[in-house]
Amino acid sequence: MKYLLIYFTGTHNTRYLTSLLKRRLELDSNEVDTIEIRCETEVVSTEIYDYIGLAYPIYGFNSPLPFNKYLRKLVFTKNQKYFIYKNSGEVWALNNASSRVIKRIMKKKKCRFMGEYHFVMPYNIHFRYPDEFISEALSYDKKLIEVMLYNIDHEIIYYPKSNVFYDIASIIVSIQKIGGNINSFFYRVDNKKCNRCGLCIKNCPHNNISLKNKNIHFSHHCDMCMACSFFCPKDAIKIGFLEKWHVNGEYKFDQIEKIEREKPYITEETKGFFKCFYRYFNEIDMMYDNIYNILSERGGKK
Ligand SMILES: Cc1cc2nc3c(=O)[nH]c(=O)nc-3n(C[C@H](O)[C@H](O)[C@H](O)COP(=O)(O)O)c2cc1C
Ligand code: SF4
Ligand code: SF4
């Protein structure tokens, strides 16, 4: 089968998730192409693909604007099969409505919905996740990939259930629409710390950053993806009214994946913020075990 995986990413979590999916698909001898969306990404032809995978990080219970904009430009064949694999830092049900715009666009294009899956990746804003938790979350991401591919293959349409309340909340909180542009007026660079390495300019998916009079300058087409401040090697960028939620420093997924966990990070006793993952991980375990049992009965492998 031929897959095209189209994704937007700010701080590379969605890029990493896509690389996990690509590797898994290639194990089964599928052909996989990927497109990372930036403002200059060219429109590609999609008709040669059997499946289109759409991936994005959830921003304020919504899909990122550049992602929606790019999808609107694409031409699909009638009944082209697509699935969504979105990701975010937490699994609150309010995130369930985040694909409403994408689904509307794809419906207009008469594409065939094959399911929607919500993966957990670490926060790139608010606070930094501990490596031990990320390692556990990645192991569940891999299980969910198995569930997703099994369901797609067997035409089982799974998706997070939304309702009118979630839809309304998601419409109200679509912060990146104007929030990012306004916030970018308040971005500041500490010129004593900044070494003019240009990484923020290179990483910005919206070409919103430039060098002016030897200083870093922000224009006002910001998607609030956080790539600039997150990857800055000198932690020199202040992110306006979100500064209190500033997270700096890349997650080293390749190293995190190698962590050997002696006991589960999330248990029934987990309290506070991380408590929500107990149910989420359990649901994945149940779906995964179910598929594993079916395959075992048929003499298949895990
Ligand atoms: C502006 C902004 C808004 C966000 N809103 C949410 C949210 O509503 N729910 C959530 O679970 N995570 C939220 N996050 C966290 C990201 O979805 C998460 O860290 C994601 O994995 C980032 O993916 P990326 O590295 O591919 O950009 C938000 C992040 C940013 C920068
Ligand atoms: S990434 Fe940081 S140090 Fe490098 S140019 Fe940008 S602000 Fe300066
Ligand atoms: S200015 Fe920073 S936060 Fe805004 S789009 Fe560019 S990299 Fe992302």
Image (tube, helix red, strand yellow):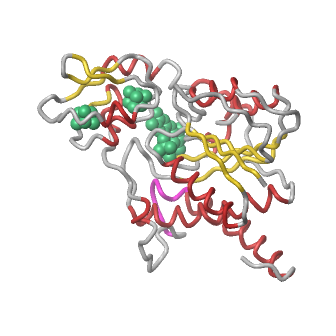
* Magenta residue check for 275: yes
Q: Residue at x 46, y 78 (%)?
A: 263
Q: Is residue 250 visible?
A: yes
- Give the answer, above or below, for where 33 lies relative to 97: below
Q: Residue at x 79, y 42 (%)?
A: 48
Q: Where residue 6 appears, x then y in whole percent?
A: 64, 40
Q: Residue at x 39, y 62 (%)?
A: 131
Specify the quadrant of the image occupied by residue 83. Answer: top right
Q: Is residue 137 left or right of residue 156?
A: left
Q: Where residue 230 appears, x then y in whole percent?
A: 34, 41
- Give the answer, above or below, for where 75 lies relative to 153: above
- Give the answer, above or below, for where 228 lies relative to 114: above
Q: Where residue 103 appears, x then y in whole percent?
A: 75, 33
Q: Is residue 242 left or right of residue 206?
A: left
| Frontmost residue, 101 versus 8 | 8
Q: Residue furthest left?
A: 192
Q: How many marks?
A: 0
Quadrant of image for the C terminus? bottom right
Q: Is residue 23 left or right of residue 251?
A: right
Quadrant of image for the N terminus? bottom right
Q: Is residue 236 visible?
A: no
* Magenta residue check for 109: no
Q: Residue at x 39, y 36 (%)?
A: 203
| Frontmost residue, 34 versus 250 | 34
Q: Where residue 33 appears, x then y in whole percent?
A: 65, 47
**Prevalent SS, magenta region:** helix
> What range of the chain is rendered magenta?
269-276
